[in-house]
Amino acid sequence: MGRKCIVEGCRAWAMRDSEYCFRHDPRPEFEEKRRRASAKGGRKSRKYPVVREQLPDIFFELKNLKDLAEFMEMVINGAMKNTMELQKARTLGQLCQAMKSILEASDIEERLEKLEEVVLGVKH
Ligand SMILES: [Zn+2]
């Protein structure tokens, strides 16, 4: 998993080249980006501008439900704060549903194998 923003209480992912998330990076260029991101108006076709900078460029390992929950949390927050496109958030939500079923199934399988080993002496 990637690094979290170092600001206390902030649970966002840190950006690739920073210890901070997009919202907390103190560098002046980010202040400017934030200002533009939160500025109202502009093009009417895009009511909620998406700020792409916060999407972490990291590989997510989704090995268990806890990993999946953290990942989903990031997706939900991204969708809420318009740092992620809703279409992408929807797709990721669907993939997470599939992943959840896979993880649950493999967990049951693992437990069953352990049970068989103990009860029936079957070696896997
Ligand atoms: Zn932060």
Image (cartoon, rainbow, N blue to C red):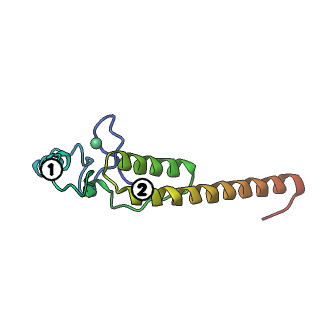
- Residue 17 drawn at (x, y percent): 24, 57
Q: CA distance from mark 2 to mark 1?
A: 23 Å
Residue furthest top as drawn: 9
Q: Residue at x 42, y 54 (%)?
A: 1
- In the rendered structure, find residue 57 and report the number of the disc placed on it: none
Q: Residue at x 11, y 52 (%)?
A: 29
The first of marks 2 and 1 along the sequence is: 1
Q: Callout 2: helix, strand or loop?
A: helix
Q: Considering depth in this image, is 21 or 79 the residue closer to the camera?
A: 79
Residue furthest bottom as drawn: 124
- In the rendered structure, find residue 36 and report the number of the disc placed on it: 1
Q: Considering depth in this image, is 16 or 84 the residue closer to the camera?
A: 84
- Residue 71 drawn at (x, y percent): 45, 52
Q: Residues within 10 Å of mark 2 (few under 14, many from 20)?
A: some
Q: Residue at x 12, y 49 (%)?
A: 32
Q: Residue at x 34, y 49 (%)?
A: 13
Residue furthest right as drawn: 120
- Amino acid type of the residue tagged 1 in the rendering: Arg
- In the rendered structure, find residue 89 and report the number of the disc placed on it: 2
